[in-house]
């Protein structure tokens, strides 16, 4: 078993999940390093995107992936913008596209190839993994607000497919309630592998810290 590691970026906090899983999504730093292969600003300005290839995608079509990626052959190569479109962009990104459909264990390996003519070919190797359903949802650290009240504002429910966007919305909703520290709304995922079922499961624990009254 390897570590599952992926990043959720929120308006109030940036946090990393570490959990046990069957495969390891590409770490953010590694992804940036693979894309940021142009060390010269002058060279980067002259580079254009050549061929764009996707491998391993079955659940989502190549046409849809290209649409979300938002770049095409002939566009200027921008590793920073490309990284956002792969990992996290409020306007839409590849990681969210998969994770919002339950693919919690999705991973992406970008490959960059420079051509003699100055163009850059991009190949994205995807491992979709199995989908995961939400299992038990628990809350810890709430003493002044009932668990039932908190669960009412969490848009994801047991039995639904995992959704990154819904989980991010849940964190925002809790942060805006008032009684809790906005930047300390934590989420502990607990993946459960279920080889005998069509989907795996992930239990969610929301860990809250109440504000201290002066």
Image (spheres, rainbow, N blue to C red):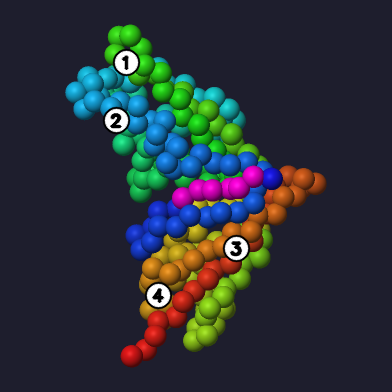
- Please state, as top left, top right, bottom left or bottom right, where the N terminus lies in the image: top right
Residue range in magenta is 2-7
> If you read the primary sequence from the N terminus, does the residue marked by circle 3 or circle 2 appear first?
2
Residue carrying label 4: 181
> If you read the primary sequence from the N terminus, does the residue marked by circle 1 or circle 4 appear first?
1
> If you read the primary sequence from the N terminus, does the residue marked by circle 1 or circle 2 appear first?
2
Q: Dots 4 and 3: beta carbons under 8 Å?
A: no
Badge 3: residue crowd in 10 Å (few <14, some 14–19, many ≥20): some
Q: Residue at x 59, y 37 (%)?
A: 128
Residue carrying label 2: 78
Q: Residue at x 49, y 66 (%)?
A: 186
Q: Quadrant of residue 146?
A: bottom right
> If you read the primary sequence from the N terminus, does the residue marked by circle 1 or circle 3 appear first?
1
Q: Dots 1 and 3: beta carbons under 8 Å?
A: no
Residue carrying label 3: 204
Q: Closer to us: mark 4 or mark 3? A: 4
Percent from the top left, x then y, of residue 74? 29, 19
The answer to which of 166 and 17 lies nearer the viewer is 17
The CA distance from mark 4 to mark 3 is 19 Å
Q: Residue at x 60, y 47 (%)?
A: 3
Residue carrying label 1: 119
């Amino acid at each position: 078993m390897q570590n599952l590691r992926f990043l959720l970026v929120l308006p109030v906090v940036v946090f990393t999940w570490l959990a046990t899983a069957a495969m390891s999504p590409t770490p953010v730093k590694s992804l940036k390093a693979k894309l940021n292969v142009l060390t010269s600003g002058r060279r980067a300005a002259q580079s254009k995107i050549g061929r764009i290839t996707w491998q391993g995608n079955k659940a989502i079509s190549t046409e849809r992936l290209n649409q979300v990626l938002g770049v095409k052959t002939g566009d200027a190569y921008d590793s920073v913008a490309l990284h956002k479109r792969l990992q996290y962009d409020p306007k839409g990104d590849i990681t969210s596209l998969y994770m919002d459909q339950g693919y919690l264990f999705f991973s992406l390996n970008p490959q960059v190839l420079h051509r003699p003519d100055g163009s850059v070919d991009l190949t994205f190797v995807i491992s979709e993994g199995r989908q995961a359903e939400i299992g038990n949802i628990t809350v810890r650290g709430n003493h002044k607000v009932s668990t039932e009240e908190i669960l009412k504002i969490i848009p994801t429910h047991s039995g639904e497919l995992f959704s990154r966007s819904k989980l991010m919305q849940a964190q925002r909703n809790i942060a805006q309630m008032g009684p809790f520290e906005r930047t300390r709304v934590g989420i502990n995922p607990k993946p459960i592998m279920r080889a005998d079922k069509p989907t795996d499961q992930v239990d969610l624990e929301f860990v809250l810290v109440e504000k201290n009254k002066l």
